[in-house]
Amino acid sequence: MKEVREKAKTKMEKSINVMLSDFAAVRVGRANPAVLDKVRVDYYGSPTPVNQLASVSVAEARVLVITPWDKSILGKIEKAIQASDIGINPQNDGTVLRMTFPQLTEEDRKRIVKDVKKQGEDTKVAIRSIRRDAIEKYKTMKKNNEITEDDMKDCEEQIQKLTDKYVKQVDVHVAEKEKEIMSI
């Protein structure tokens, strides 16, 4: 019984962590190296993350500087960033790439908040799905006479408390991200 609950807890935590890593990549008008986390560069035939090919630093509040360790890869990094969905064209000066993040308009901020809320809802759906799977396992255990009716009720209550806890965490993280996006 306990291993079912622990497995569900681990999966719920992973769902939250995935959401948080997605949130880190959201563009909020300030330079953030995390926006490059999902950009892959074709480096000798294998897709490689930018941060493994170059140092990425924040030069100013809205400028990201990418300095490749191998200067011959500069053009490939630039093409990979342009092909991504970041929406910012890097400036190539021959030695480094500069990405200047424009100020977000009110409309852009609202659109981003809407996307963040959708990611939050998707995470809640995933958490509820994990709850459903755990309860199904308990019902199977009850059917096979491995646990009693009372044990099953207790386990369902514990899984529901766990679900409520993680759904509340999602709401808190979404609210924090919304506040960060809407602040100028």
Image (spheres, helix red, strand yellow):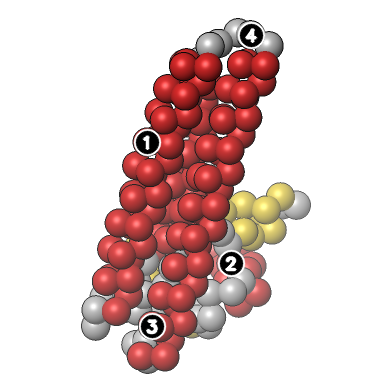
Q: Are marks 4 and 3 in contact (CB under 8 Å)?
A: no
- The residue positioned 43% from the left and 36% from the top of the image is 160
Report the amino acid beneath label 2.
Ile
Q: Are marks 2 and 3 in contact (CB under 8 Å)?
A: no
Q: Position of residue 91 (x, y in %)?
A: 48, 82
Q: Say which element carries label 4.
A: loop
Distance (Cα) linking label 1 and label 4: 24 Å
Task: Nearest to the eye among marks 1 and 3: give it.
Answer: 1
In the displayed structure, 137 sits above or below 115; it is above
For marks 1 and 4, the one nearer the N-term is 4
* Residue assigned mark 1: 161
In the displayed structure, 27 sits above or below 107; it is above
* Residue assigned mark 3: 109
Mark number for residue 145?
Answer: 4
> What is the residue that sits farthest to the right in this orientation?
45
For marks 4 and 2, the one nearer the N-term is 2
Q: Say which element carries label 3.
A: helix
In the displayed structure, 82 sits above or below 15; it is below
